[in-house]
Image (cartoon, coloured by chain):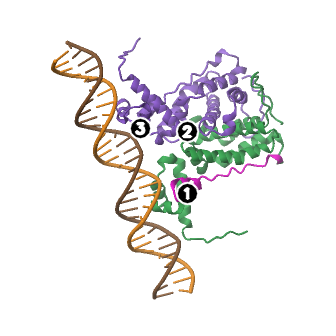
Chain colours: A green, B purple, C orange, D brown
DNA sequence: GTTGTTTGCCAACACCTGTTGACGTTAGGC
DNA sequence: GCCTAACGTCAACAGGTGTTGGCAAACAAC
């Protein structure tokens, strides 16, 4: 199943462009990350970017492919799901230019937001579907999970709110684990009665 | 204490510019919301924007002043804090162009992110300080609270993840209330041992 | 009615953007 | 060796940007 690997001479250049693009998009967002700036950081001419990636939009699409690599929840006891997901995402996200780039660009470019929705539908939703048989409820759980994790990424890596930046990964995991556990397995209280029982969300 | 109110003829124009600016910034972000587009929506000439607001950056500063109007927690029992804050913010944020504009712009413009941090420090942190005497812990609580609430705003109003958009305000409040309660009053588990007890975070 | 100020529009500026095509230069096949 | 294709640079294009100054009309004061 080996695909063609021509090992062209230009591969190094293409990789340099991609790396520079990720850095610039992550640091500056879509508009301010100009092709000229990306090319300069990669040490080549702006026209090379066009030749190898066609357009700025296609360059972003190439730079913002993102795999969450979520763990298999069915292999561990339900009571540890929150902690597992929290630790996994925290480790995967610290200093990850691709995530920050995608997040920054998605707030202003429709096609990047669309990609964010695709990633969610393709990677987060299936994870929750494994452990929640009711489709409507699974959708809610997945959505709320995204709410909390993307909120963390936003405030810690993009807005850089001081108290959120100051927390260590371990402290973050301690705060987040019960919350993610709640979204994954907690029972939802009836909206009308609005009785909030934080409850011990330890099992399904 | 009445300040001078000349009631100039240009007040209507200035207000129209501000309203148009909020809409364009909220819909397009900083770079794509051009002064020409804002002026066109306000039905006036681009040069008027400069005359009345000096520069694009100052226009944004004028358009993005934002009051959270958080409730006084000391007036109600601690067990209802989560629900109170959840309902308050949900009601305050639904269809609020100023919030969306500030959030969208803050992801790409440093000075807007700085303003976000100022709002946080001036409005969220004091709220938590009222009910948490330990300053270090209060800072953590406020930070995690921001994490969840800004994550909701991001996924619901900006990225528009379908499952998050689909939730009704009441459903959202039902999911969020115990989480905010946890951040406001829950005891933090020791980071090292990483023992997650979601616990009944009903009292301080 | 004349003056001075406010309100608005128009045209232009200097600059930066993504994108393109022509032109050298290098590498590899034969 | 030659020849072809890939690689890389340079200069330019057409269009859009924030911003500025001048000029006409509307208003206010006297």
Secondary element type, mark 1:
helix
Secondary element type, mark 2:
loop
Quarter containing the C terminus of chain B: top right
Secondary element type, mark 3:
helix
Q: Is residue B188 left or right of residue A96?
A: right
Answer above or below: position of B145 versus B30. Answer: above
| Alpha-carbon span between mark 3 and mark 2 | 25 Å
Q: Which residue is mark 1?
A: A19
Observer-side mark, 3 or 1, equals 3
Tell me which chain the residue with mark 3 is part of. Answer: B
Residue D29 spot, x, y in % from top left: 24, 14
Q: Dot 2, how many residues are within 10 Å of its Cα: few (below 14), some (14-19), or many (20+)? A: many
Q: Which residue is mark 3?
A: B35
Part of the protein shown in magenta: A54-74
Residue A68 spot, x, y in % from top left: 69, 49
Tell me which chain the residue with mark 1 is part of. Answer: A
Q: Return the disc, 2 or 1, that comes first in the chain's sequence.
A: 1
Rendered residue at 77%/43% (across/down): A128
Q: Which residue is mark 2?
A: A159
- The answer to whether residue A71 is magenta is yes
């Amino acid at each position: 199943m080996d695909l063609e690997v021509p090992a062209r001479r230009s591969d190094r250049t293409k990789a340099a462009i991609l790396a520079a693009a990720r850095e610039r998009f992550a640091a500056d967002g879509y508009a301010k990350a100009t092709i000229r700036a990306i090319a300069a950081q990669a040490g080549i001419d702006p026209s090379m970017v066009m030749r190898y990636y066609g357009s700025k939009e296609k360059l972003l699409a190439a730079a913002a492919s993102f795999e969450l690599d979520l763990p298999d929840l069915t292999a561990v006891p339900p009571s540890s799901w929150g902690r597992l997901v929290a630790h996994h995402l925290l480790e995967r996200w610290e200093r990850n230019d691709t995530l920050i780039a995608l997040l920054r660009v998605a707030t202003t470019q429709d096609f990047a937001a669309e990609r964010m929705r695709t990633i969610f539908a393709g990677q987060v939703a299936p994870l929750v579907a494994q452990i929640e048989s009711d489709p409507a409820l699974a959708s809610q759980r997945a959505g709320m999970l995204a709410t909390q994790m993307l909120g963390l990424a936003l405030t810690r890596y993009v807005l850089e709110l001081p108290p959120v930046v100051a927390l260590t990964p371990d402290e973050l995991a301690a705060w987040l684990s019960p919350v993610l556990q709640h979204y994954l397995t907690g029972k939802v209280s009836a909206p009308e009665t609005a009785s909030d029982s934080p409850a011990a969300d330890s099992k399904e």
